[in-house]
Amino acid sequence: MTGRQWAGRTALVTGALGFIGSHFVEQLAARGARVLALHRGERPGIKEELAALPGSERIRFVAVDLRDANETRAAFKYLAPSIDTVVHCAGLDGNARFKHEHSAEILDSNQRITSNLLNCVRDFGAGEVLVMSSSEVYCAPLTSATSEDDDHRAHMRYTDNGYVLSKTYAEILAGLHRRQFGTDVFLVRPANVYGPRDSFDTSRGRVIPSMLAKAEAGEEIEIWGDGSQTRSFVHVADLVRASLRMVETAGHRVLNVGTTEETTILDLARMVTDVLGRPERIRTVPSRPVGVTGRRLDLSRMFEVIDFEPRTLRAGLEETIRWYRRHQHQHQTTR
C-alpha cells in the first residue's frame, strides 16, 4: 500500500505528554518526522512523562496552555511556518465517574482548546489537522454496526455528558472550518483505548488501567451496572498506526478505529485478573449509570486503509501489564 512518507516533514502534536499524544510523538519521530511536542507545562508528574518518551533530536518539547488564546497564538506565530501536519490529542478526559462529576469543566476546557487550535491553524497556515475524536459521538440506534455516516449529521440528541458534547463540538467546528476556510481535516473515532502510559489513577483512569491497578493491589474491582454492557478496545499503538495510515493514504477524512473483538465489562474484569494471576474480586453496582449498553463499529474503512493486523485484547493486556509492572518497579526504586 503506497502513501506519503513522514521523513523530513514536521508534525505538531498537542497533548504530547498525554496517553495518546505521547504515542503519536514516539511513532512520528521513529518515522523520521520532526515533532513539535506541545504540552501543558509544569505540573506534578511531568518529569516522569518526559522520561517515558525516547530521547530523540527530532523531538522538541514546547510548553503551551492551549486554553489560553493569546498564549496559543504566540506559539503558533513562532512555530507555524514549518508545520505540515497538526495532530490534536489535547483535552480533559477520564473514566465514567470523572466525566459524570466534571462535565462542565471538561466541556469548557476542551471546546476552548479546539477553538484556539483551529483558529491558529487557519490564521497561520499550519497545514492539515488530524483531530482525535471518539466513538462516543455516535447516537445511532444499536441495530447494526455503526458507520462513519451515523454521526451528528444523522442523529443529534441532547446529553449532559460534557466529554461527549466536547467531542461533538470539535467535529462540528472542524467541519465548518473545512467548509468555510478550506482546512484539511481528518477525524478519528476510536473505540476504547488502552495501553502503556495510560493513567493508572483509579479515581479518574479509564476502565482497563483502573481495573488493572486495583487487581494488582489486591483491591476489589467495582463495575457500574451489572457488567453486561459490551465494549470494544483498541491498543494505543494500533490506534496511532491506523491514524497515521489514514493521513498517509488520504483516502478518507473520517475513520472508525477499533477491533472486531467485543467483550462485556464483567468478562473484561475476569480477563484482567486472569492475565495478572490475581483472584477475582469483582463487585457490580446495578444502580450506577453505565452509558450505552453496547456499540459495534463498522470497521470497513479501517481495514481498507491499514496494512497491519490489530493485536487481540489479551495480547494487548499482557503487554500493558508488563509495562505497568516495570513502570511501578522503576517508580518505587527511584523514589
Image (cartoon, helix red, strand yellow):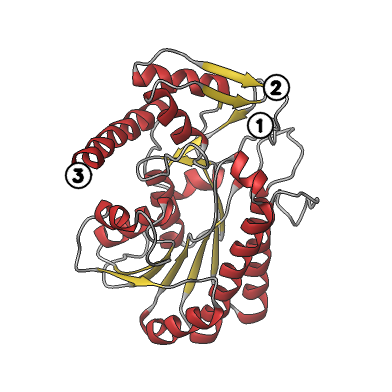
* Mark 2 or mark 3, whichever is nearer to me: 3
Name which of mark 1 and mark 3 comes first in the sequence. 1
Instruction: Give the Cα distance between marks 2 and 1.
Output: 16 Å
| Residue 50 on image: x %, y % | 28, 58
| Residue 61 on image: x %, y % | 31, 69
**x 66%, y 31%: residue:** 294
Q: Are marks 2 and 1 in contact (CB under 8 Å)?
A: no
Q: Residues within 10 Å of mark 3 (few under 14, many from 20)?
A: few
Say the numbered circle drawn on residue 294. 1
Say the numbered circle drawn on residue 286. 2
Name which of mark 2 and mark 1 comes first in the sequence. 2
* Amino acid at pointer 1: Gly
| Residue 30 on image: x %, y % | 25, 58
* Amino acid at pointer 2: Pro
Quickly name the residue at label 3: 334
Which structural element holds mark 2?
loop
Above or below, 262 against 46 in this view is above
